[in-house]
Image: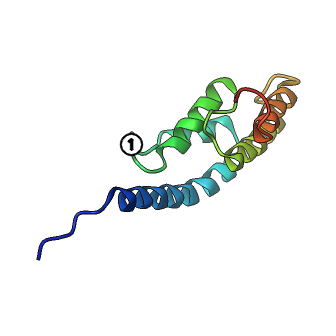
Amino acid sequence: MARRRKTKSERHQERIEAEQRAWELFRPRLDALQSRADALKLLTEAPPPDSPGRKYYSNLGFFLQGFTPPGGSSYAEKALYVQLIQRMDKLGELKPGARETIEQALRHAMEGVGNW
């Protein structure tokens, strides 16, 4: 018996569900990060391009490069970046005063303020 070809809508729904599963796996890992070194290690485990969940690793990499909110990142991602920045600051990994500036940019992006 020949398999029925999936519709564009079905393929789209499967992609959304795969992204959700990838987020559910990535979120606790992002939440558990304690330092920049931990975050960089996590980046080495990124799935290949065009794979479900790749965007979360790309967003984290972008964030770590300039400590600016990645375009297309979710509210939840930004909230976890705030927590990561706070932990990094406690470890002395940030310049004095940097935490407040980074946190403010993230919070503005979370509120939809600015060009993020």
Q: Quadrant of residue 60?
A: top right
In this rendering, position of residue 32 left or right of residue 109: left
Q: Nearer the viewer, residue 36 or 3?
A: 3
Which of the image's four quarters has the C terminus? top right
Residue on which disc 1 sits: 50
Question: Residue shown at 77%/28% (left/top)?
Answer: 114
Q: Position of residue 94 (x, y in %)?
A: 78, 27
Badge 1 amino acid = Asp
In this rendering, position of residue 39 left or right of residue 106: left
Q: Position of residue 33 (x, y in %)?
A: 67, 47
Q: Quadrant of residue 95?
A: top right
Q: Quadrant of residue 2?
A: bottom left
Q: Pointer 1: residues within 10 angstroms few (<14), some, or many (20+)?
A: few
Which of the image's four quarters has the N terminus? bottom left
In this rendering, position of residue 108 left or right of residue 31: right
Q: Position of residue 91 (x, y in %)?
A: 79, 36
Q: Nearer the viewer, residue 44 or 63?
A: 63
Colour scheme of the rendered structure: rainbow
Q: How many marks?
A: 1
Q: Is residue 11 above or below residue 70?
A: below
Callout 1: helix, strand or loop? loop
In this rendering, position of residue 32 left or right of residue 12: right
Q: Position of residue 9 (x, y in %)?
A: 39, 59
Question: Residue shown at 68%/52% (left/top)?
Answer: 31
Residue furthest out toward the bottom = 1
